[in-house]
Amino acid sequence: MGSLLRSEDMTLLRLYFDRAAAHDTIDELGKLGLLQFNDLNHQSSMFQRAYAADVRRCEEMMRKVRFFHKEIEKVPEIDKVYQAEIDKRRQMIAPTVSEHTSLTELDSRLSSFEVSLKDILQNYDALVA
């Protein structure tokens, strides 16, 4: 594996590939660790770029994950009490979430978990009040 030092020989290439294959192609090329990408759209603002909607979607998914984390931290003994159940569910979920899970699938799953958790919290608050 080479490095991206100035003294190394480099070749400038322009790659064209189908939009549908872009994610997988860039992912595989990135794993090689031998590339440097140049931004050919530097004059465009971040919000005018083709992937801006995906970035916003990822930020929204991160918000949901932070929400889950915050709620889990409120009950520090949850991992001790439900460790067996957590491990069982982790085994069930792990094979279904892979590096090939699409943003749409992941967003859908997180949204359904968020709705479920909000319902649980609402019911809990009604019981406590």
Image: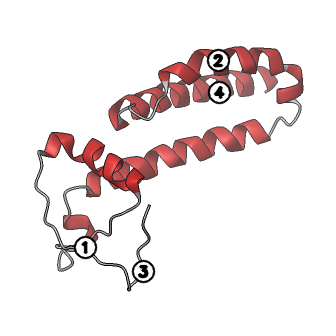
Q: Is residue 37 above or below residue 125?
A: below
Q: Nearer the viewer, mark 1 or mark 2?
A: 1
* Label drawn at residue 91: 2
* Label drawn at residue 54: none
Q: Are marks 1 and 3 in contact (CB under 8 Å)?
A: no
Going by the numbered disc 3, the residue's amino acid type is Leu
| Mark before the other along the chain sequence, 1 or 3 | 3
Instruction: Examine the image and state in which quarter residue 16 appears.
Output: bottom left
- Residue at the spot of label 1: 38
As rendered, which of 30 and 116 lies closer to the eye? 30
Residue 9 locus on image (x, y percent): 30, 78
Q: Secondary structure at mark 2?
A: helix
Q: Is residue 6 above or below residue 14?
A: below
* Label drawn at residue 5: 3
Residue 94 in the figure: left or right of residue 26: right
Going by the numbered disc 4, the residue's amino acid type is Gln
Q: Secondary structure at mark 1?
A: loop
